[in-house]
Image: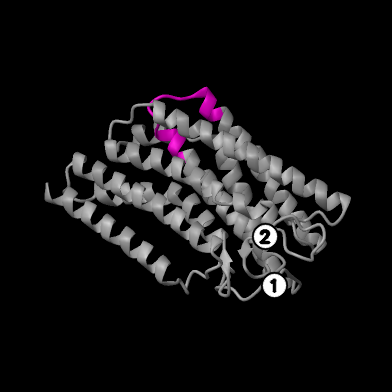
Amino acid sequence: MTTATALRTAARWHRPLLVLTAGMAVFALVTAVGIVADHRVITGAPAWLKPFKFSVSFAVYGLTLAWMLSILPRRSRAGEWAAVAIVGVAFVEVGIIVLQAARGTTSHYNETSPLNAALWQAMGMAILVLFLAHAVIAIVAVRQKIKDRANAYAIRLGLGLSLLGMLAAVPMVLPGQAPAGVDDITGAHSVGVPDGGPGLPLTGWSTTGGDLRIGHFVGLHALQALPLLAFLLGRTSLDGIRRARLLLVAGGAYGVLTVLLTWQALRAQPLLHPDALTLGAWAALAAATATATALVLKK
């Protein structure tokens, strides 16, 4: 890439999304200090851990979307305005999470007071707007012609599967997920056990029951995983058709994995303690993926 081409590409990066990335990086630094300096615990975890994780996630998300919009052949007003909406609601959502951590209470599912209920409902609206705006960007990417087929599949599948990851969070707020005997808590991410129990390091994913955050997390990060795979395949000697087909195989496997992880959680199984049925489903997915990959490479 020449210097002139690089400058033209850099100029097309979506500036509000870069502001989002920078702002979330600042939040991440501040909340990281909070984890060390503030010893309060909320739902079994350091008070500032959730704001830290959301800040990092949104920083990566904003940077990824900014890059994707920059490499589309044509600028799209719909896509760029959708990205502006994402910036706005991301700051609202993380701002509420930070505020509630500072107040020493939970942000998600919390309707224990009029203020907490209003903040949780505002978060719900923000999440809905983010989902719709992300869908608009996905549609824009599908409608544009990207020369390299592997890159095109990586971007389109990444955007689409991250929508699936967002949908994987829906069971968290269904009526059956509200913990029994706890008033004014309207959902939970754990299945079969209370939120805040023993969990994996850093992620906090339950080690004693199902955890809906796992499928949610995996699905969301298709946005980064598939473009990264396309980049790595581009450094091989494989031709464009094989690289594109491998991306289709990877995208299909990734989507099924997201569904399997959500299904496992809904059956109240910890990630590291699957039963025979879950192991069989994983084995079937691995076998199908390996077979499809071998067929692509053999041709």
Nearer to us in this view, 253 or 150: 253
Count of number-bearing discs = 2
Nearer to us in this view, 244 or 266: 266
Q: Which mark is residue 63?
A: none
Measuring from the top left, give residue 96's x and y in whole percent.
Answer: 74, 50
Measuring from the top left, give residue 172's x and y in whole percent.
Answer: 63, 55
Q: Going by the image, does 43 lie left or right of 205?
A: right
Magenta stretch, main secondary structure, is: helix
The magenta stretch spans which residues?
67-80
Measuring from the top left, give residue 210's x and y in whole percent.
Answer: 56, 66
Question: Label 1 sits on what residue type?
Answer: Gly
Q: CA distance from mark 2 to mark 1?
A: 14 Å
Q: Earlier in the sequence, mark 2 or mark 1?
A: 1
Q: Which mark is residue 188?
A: 2
Which residue occupies 34% across, 32% down?
Answer: 5
Q: Is residue 120 magenta?
A: no
Write down the quadrant of residue 185 in the picture.
bottom right
Disc number lying in front (2 or 1): 2
Sort mark 1 into few (<14), some (14-19) or many (20+) by Cα contacts within 10 Å: few
Question: Label 2 sits on what residue type?
Answer: Ala
Which residue occupies 26% across, 41% down?
Answer: 244
